[in-house]
Amino acid sequence: MDTQSPLHATCVAVGGAGVLITGASGSGKSNLALQMLALGAVLVADDRVLLTETDGHLMATCPPTLVGLIEARGIGILNAQSCAGAPVRLAVDLSTVETERIPPRREVTLLGVHIPLFHRASDIHLASAILQFMRAGRSER
């Protein structure tokens, strides 16, 4: 069964896998995405993400009118290298600040699919830490 839902969020792809960035308006979703783009990620969608669930998998795509566009607050709308979509493998909630040095594993359920979840961590290393998680995962030690 296919289920689709639009979401106020931003999504980038790292190695073909999606990072869904959520949070309140002005929380820094586009800013984090821009940092990740500068480090080699590819834009899926900025501001609005279409999520589709099919057979237990979550796919993120972009509404046609926003393909390849990302907002840089105080600069304007910028063009960006983009991809057609990506399977979501991680969610980052910028509305909730992480208070623990080594937090427990968290997840969020979107359209019935369980996705690992990070909260807002130090802005100094958040983009780099997300990229490293996407490339190599979290240690079991």
Image (tube, rainbow, N blue to C red):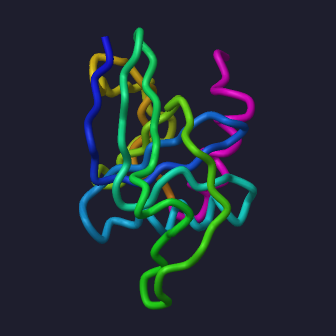
| Residue 98 is at least partly visible in this image | no
Q: Is residue 138 found left or right of 109 in the rendered image?
A: right
**Rendered position, 9 above or below 133:** below
Quadrant hosting residue 68: bottom right
**Rendered position, 72 above or below 59:** below
Identify which residue is drawn at 50% across, 69% down: 70
| Residue 83 is at least partly visible in this image | yes
Q: Is residue 137 found left or right of 116 in the rendered image?
A: right
Give the x, y percent position of residue 116.
Answer: 45, 27
Q: Nearer the viewer, residue 64 or 17?
A: 64
- Asked if residue 86 is among those painted magenta in the image, a careful observer would answer no
Identify which residue is drawn at 44% across, 90% down: 74
Quadrant hosting residue 117: top left
Identify which residue is drawn at 47% across, 86% down: 76
Residue that sits furthest to the front in the current view = 64
Stretch in magenta = 123-141
Give the x, y percent position of residue 58.
Answer: 43, 25
- Asked if residue 135 is among those painted magenta in the image, a careful observer would answer yes
Identify which residue is drawn at 32% across, 18% down: 2
**Rendered position, 77 above or below 120:** below
Q: Quadrant of the N terminus?
A: top left
Give the x, y percent position of residue 131.
Answer: 67, 45
Give the x, y percent position of residue 63.
Answer: 39, 53
